[in-house]
Image (cartoon, rainbow, N blue to C red):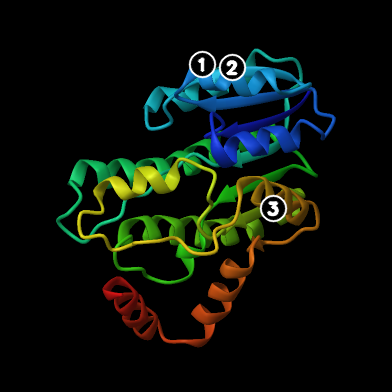
Amino acid sequence: MDIAIITGASSGLGAWYARQLDAEHLDELWLVARREKRLATIAGLCKTKTRVLALDLTDTDAIETIEHELAQTDEPDVRWLVNCAGFGRIGFAGDIDAATLAQMTELNCIAPLRLTTAMLPFMSAGSSILNVASCAAFQPIPGVSVYAATKAFVLSWSRSLRYELATQGIGVTAVCPYWIRDTEFIGRAEATDTRKLFKNFPFPTDAETVARRSIRAAKNGIDVCTPDAISFLDRIAAKILPHGMLMHLMGLWHRL
């Protein structure tokens, strides 16, 4: 049975991954997120048979639940694993409580690591892993320092994982978009921005474009997908300019 597993599938980018992979002639889509009603709504938009798994991936039992579901499935073959669940917060050191930062690290880093490791025995040659990072992964960013660091982990890990799984024929693509306008991410990230560090989010992309282009990138064997103009330019700038200079420029933007 050919399966796609998508985390963070209740809204935004994760929901668009579900809609895009609905056209891939799979046997089942497994949608994973905390909000069951929202997942059911997304499932109702899909023609493919869909399984709703209302789970909090920071819960240590969540991965075991997915493994158990696969063990009970006839000849499961995870063709797509999309690690999309995650969140960010805006603020300088001391503005955001330690518990929130720890939860962010758990969901953005540890959860995809644990889930991917658990899913590998159920994957085969031709399977694809999409790890949603961010163009924030390319350099340190004051104001979203922990978020950027978590995405740097995802990017670095994805690149190494791709190399390690190459002999098994399993592809890995890190997805590194700029701000996405039509998700809940920006509104939630701004909740802790008491200093008004980010006053606007110019030239954002959209979730459908990111999902569509990153799936195409995975099919074409691309290791890092920058699906919009700003993320592409940021990737180049981060290779050319010293990170100290980039952080200084970010500081100037904060003061505008």
Q: Name the residue tied to disc 1.
A: 37
Work out how far the residue at label 1 is from the one at label 2, CA to CA, in angstroms: 5 Å
Work out how far the residue at label 2 is from the one at label 3, CA to CA, in angstroms: 24 Å
Q: Quadrant of the C terminus?
A: bottom left
Residue 22 seen by the camera: yes
The tag earlier along the polypeptide, 1 or 3, is 1
Q: Which three-letter amino acid code belongs to the residue tagged 1?
A: Lys
Q: Which three-letter amino acid code belongs to the residue tagged 2?
A: Ala
Residue positioned 80% across, 44% down in the render: 126
Q: Name the residue tied to disc 2.
A: 40
Q: Residue furthest right?
A: 25
Q: Quadrant of the N terminus?
A: top right
Q: Quick one: SS at disc 3?
A: helix
Q: Which three-letter amino acid code belongs to the residue tagged 3?
A: Ser
Nearer to us of marks 2 and 3 is: 2
Q: Does the CB distance between marks 1 and 2 fall below 8 Å?
A: yes
Q: Quick one: SS at disc 2?
A: helix
Q: Which mark is residue 214?
A: 3
